[in-house]
Amino acid sequence: MPVTIKDVARLAGVSPATVSLVLSNKGQVSEETRRKVLEAVQKLGYRPNVLARNLVKGKTRTVLLCAFIREDRKLSTFYGDLINSLLAATSSSGYYLQIVVKGEFFNGHPLDKREALLDIARNRLFEGLFILSHWPVQYPEVSDLVREGFPFVVVNQRVEGDGVSYVDIDHYGGAREAMRYLLEQGHTRIAHIRGPQGHRHAEERYRAYLDALIERGIPIRREYIVEGDFRRLSGREAMERLLETRPLPTAVFCANDKMAIGALQVAKERGIRVHEDLTIFGFDGIEAVKYTDPPIPTVEQPLGELGKVAAEILMERIQGGEGKSVVLPCRLVEWSTV
């Protein structure tokens, strides 16, 4: 049987009249109620003609952030800051931002993500779409959006292919800056607490670490490379392993700030004078590294600019503009000047 407005109202816990107000974009309805109704419409696949007319006229002024990130862990500072920047940039453009987290795709089939995105486009509940994913986004997963002509921007990843708009950060270049900093300080025994294998940004930072050593003719020591998972605890565990190596490294480049904080904690517990006996360097630029003792030098990702540029591109796409691909540079922040 076809889905009715009463089905939507029942699932959202509101009256059919309230559903009508939301779908017609009329009357005074709270943002929380609006969100519940639109989520119910999407889940049930309800496709009212009035909504289609409103979308054609551009009256809904609502875009969606579809975040493929794990739901079973606390939202990281990185994702929180990035989502806030997208929210601020979208709001300043006069649009509402709805957010849905698709954490169940952690071990899902690649086709699942493709079908989820296509369903969002065909429901026409939103005028545009931000795609944010902890896991790699492949072109086949967004090719249906390209074919449908649905405006979207992939955020914090590069997805090569015709018709794809994305905004990413130069992780390789940022990591090279970190290594340049350490090498210019005279370090040759540089360890690396890398991110998880298969994570695209972790791989780019790891590749930059290797390339910097190779270009200087410095031997790569396998015992100086320890894998973490971007969490503080893994940084602690990695540092414990590195302190068992001989000779000890004089610097540790960590693939993110959380692991750098964990490494710093272990070093201080062992009585090591950080930045005198051992330099620890992070990546991300989260606020916490300003307040460690001592502060940790880092490579700052321009999350505010990332959200701003992504929103600008999506607004242009909604207005019929061409797709764009932008890669933003990082900024090195020395601990002594934080």
Image (cartoon, helix red, strand yellow):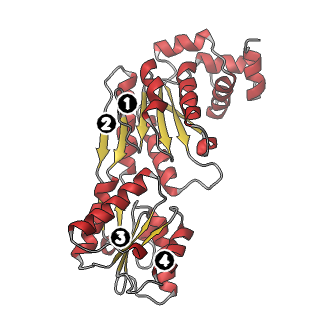
As drawn, the label of residue 297 is 3
Q: Which of 24 and 219 is in front in this view?
A: 219
- Asked if the residue under mark 2 is in contact with the one under mark 1, i.e. CB atoms within 8 Å, the reply is yes
Report the Cα–Cα distance between label 1 and label 4. Answer: 40 Å
> Circle 4 — which element?
helix
Residue named by callout 4: 239
Between the C-alphas of marks 3 and 1, the distance is 35 Å
SS class, disc 1: loop
Disc 3 or 2, which lies upstream in sequence? Answer: 3
Quarter residue 29 falls in:
top right
Q: Which amino acid does label 1 sit on?
A: Val
Looking at the picture, which amino acid does disc 4 mark? Met
The reply to whether callout 3 and callout 2 are in contact (CB within 8 Å) is no
- What is the C-alpha distance between the residues marked 4 and 2? 37 Å
Mark 4 against mark 2, which lies toward the viewer? 4
Q: What residue type is labelled 3?
A: Pro
Q: Nearer the viewer, mark 3 or mark 1?
A: 1
Where, quadrant-wise, is the N terminus in this rendering? top right
- Report helix, strand or loop for mark 2: strand
Mark 4 or 3: the one toward you: 4
- Other residues around mark 3 within 10 Å, as few (<14) / some (14–19) / many (≥20): many
Mark before the other along the chain sequence, 3 or 1: 1
179 shown above or below 151 = below
Percent x, y for residue 25?
58, 19
**Residue 39 in sight from this viewpoint:** yes
N-terminal-most mark, 1 or 2:
1
Quarter the C terminus occupies: bottom left
Residue density around tag 1, few if under 14, some if 14–19, many if 20 or more, within 10 Å? many
Q: Is residue 232 left or right of residue 104?
A: left
Residue carrying label 1: 164
Q: Can residue 332 be seen in this view?
A: no
